[in-house]
């Protein structure tokens, strides 16, 4: 029997973030002109991202996990988007004069050669072992030099505190007591039908035709229906799905969110009470830094999008081979 690992969506994000932050040795992309013998998953400014290199990254991320086809495809799609973003970030650094200079690369190459000499290994052997060419090596070294330098410029104590002040409830331990009305997707009722039903329920609650508690007890398909939808206290990090938590933390006490979709179905979320956290930005330094790194990565990629041309070929994700 094959065990299919269940990988929750937050873990997918985490795995992809870790691949970006912790695996700089992997070839990030091919930089020469497209080669018909080397299938490309996408092209950024005419330069291909090879399927073979995405396969390497995918294997590094998932390891020996046995995944369902749906989960496999989800991870693969998010991986491609992240690699495209990395290319955009690199182009942004180059366009704005923040990338590593040629002199920087020469120094980095010399240090690499010295390290390889200690291991009694040549540069050619190193490239062959890692399936890199000279251009790919320069890109890899440029990324390893330029991206940390960019982060050092912006990930400062002042910016950590500023980000904390703007997103305090995500880091200070704030909890919210919430209730919800859940409608589950079935063969009979698809997402669109459930969204329409939740809009109608929300309107009835807003008009005072029924209370949220009454609506939950009559219509919710969650085990919490008997308690009027009350599921108790949650914080920013769990235990509810991301979309649910986002809605709960964006809703004022006593009010009801717009319908939100999760893997469980379609929810209406009511914030009932807020318990303010007392944590400081210093205590949340590590998660704050991780959040700012992710923000800067997305921000730099977005700054470059209007200056770059992205073309997806449709060759990724690949279909998993069928079991015999």
Image (cartoon, rainbow, N blue to C red):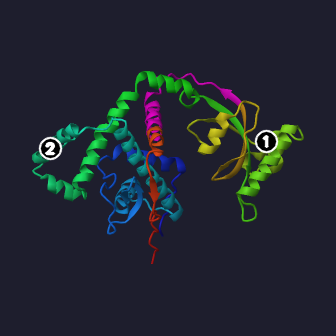
The answer to whether residue 281 is magenta is: yes
Foreground disc of the pair 1, 2: 2
Residue drawn at point x = 53 percent, y = 29 percent: 171
Q: Residues within 10 Å of mark 2 (few under 14, many from 20)?
A: few
Is residue 37 visible in the rendered image? The answer is yes
Q: In the drawing, does residue 20 fall left or right of residue 262? A: left
* Tag count: 2
Q: In the drawing, does residue 176 fall left or right of residue 150? A: right
Up/down of 11 relative to 175, above or below: below
Q: In which quadrant will I find the C terminus?
A: bottom left
Q: Secondary structure at mark 1?
A: loop
Residue drawn at point x = 63 percent, y = 53 percent: 263
Up/down of 132 relative to 232, above or below: below
Give how far across and how far down residue 71 sits, in percent.
51, 59
Residue corresponding to mark 2 = 115
Residue drawn at point x = 36 percent, y = 28 percent: 153
Give how far across and how far down residue 246 sits, in percent.
62, 39
Give how far across and how far down residue 24 sits, in percent.
31, 46
> In the depicted view, which residue is nearer to us: 110 or 56?
110
Q: Secondary structure at mark 2?
A: helix
Marks 2 and 1: in contact by CB < 8 Å?
no
> In the depicted view, which residue is nearer to us: 284 or 137?
137
> In the depicted view, which residue is nearer to us: 188 or 153?
153
Residue corresponding to mark 1 = 228
Give how far across and how far down residue 136 sits, in percent.
27, 52
Up/down of 291 relative to 130, above or below: above
Q: What segment is highlighted magenta in the picture? A: 273-298
Asked which quadrant contains residue 304, the reply is top left
The answer to whether residue 82 is magenta is: no
């Amino acid at each position: 029997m094959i065990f299919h690992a269940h990988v929750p969506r937050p873990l997918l994000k985490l795995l992809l973030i870790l691949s970006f932050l912790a695996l700089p040795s992997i070839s990030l992309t091919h930089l020469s002109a497209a080669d018909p013998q080397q299938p490309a998953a996408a092209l950024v400014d005419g330069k291909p991202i090879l399927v073979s290199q995405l396969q390497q990254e995918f294997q590094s991320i998932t390891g020996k996990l046995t995944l369902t086809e749906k989960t496999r495809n989800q991870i693969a799609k998010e991986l491609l988007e992240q690699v495209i973003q990395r290319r955009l970030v690199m182009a942004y650094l180059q366009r704005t004069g923040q990338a590593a200079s040629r002199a920087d690369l020469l120094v980095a190459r010399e240090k690499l050669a010295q390290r390889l000499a200690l291991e009694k290994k040549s540069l050619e052997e190193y490239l062959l072992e890692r399936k890199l060419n000279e251009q790919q090596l320069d890109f890899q070294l440029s990324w390893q030099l330029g991206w940390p330098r960019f982060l050092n410029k912006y990930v400062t104590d002042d910016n950590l505190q500023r980000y904390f002040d703007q997103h305090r409830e995500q880091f200070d331990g704030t909890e919210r007591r919430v209730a919800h009305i859940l409608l589950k997707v079935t063969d009979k009722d698809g997402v669109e039908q459930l969204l329409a039903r939740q809009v109608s329920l929300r309107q009835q609650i807003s008009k005072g035709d029924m209370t949220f508690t009454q609506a939950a007890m009559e219509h919710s398909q969650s085990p919490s229906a008997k308690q009027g939808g009350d599921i108790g206290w949650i914080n920013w990090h769990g235990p509810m799905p991301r979309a649910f938590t986002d809605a709960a933390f964006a809703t004022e006490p006593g009010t009801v969110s717009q319908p939100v979709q999760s893997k469980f179905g379609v929810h209406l979320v009511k914030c009932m009470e807020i318990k303010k956290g007392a944590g400081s930005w210093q205590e949340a330094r590590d998660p704050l830094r991780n959040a700012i790194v992710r923000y800067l990565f997305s921000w730099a990629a977005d700054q470059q999008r209007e200056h770059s041309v992205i073309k997806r070929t449709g060759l990724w994700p690949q279909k998993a081979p069928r079991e015999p």
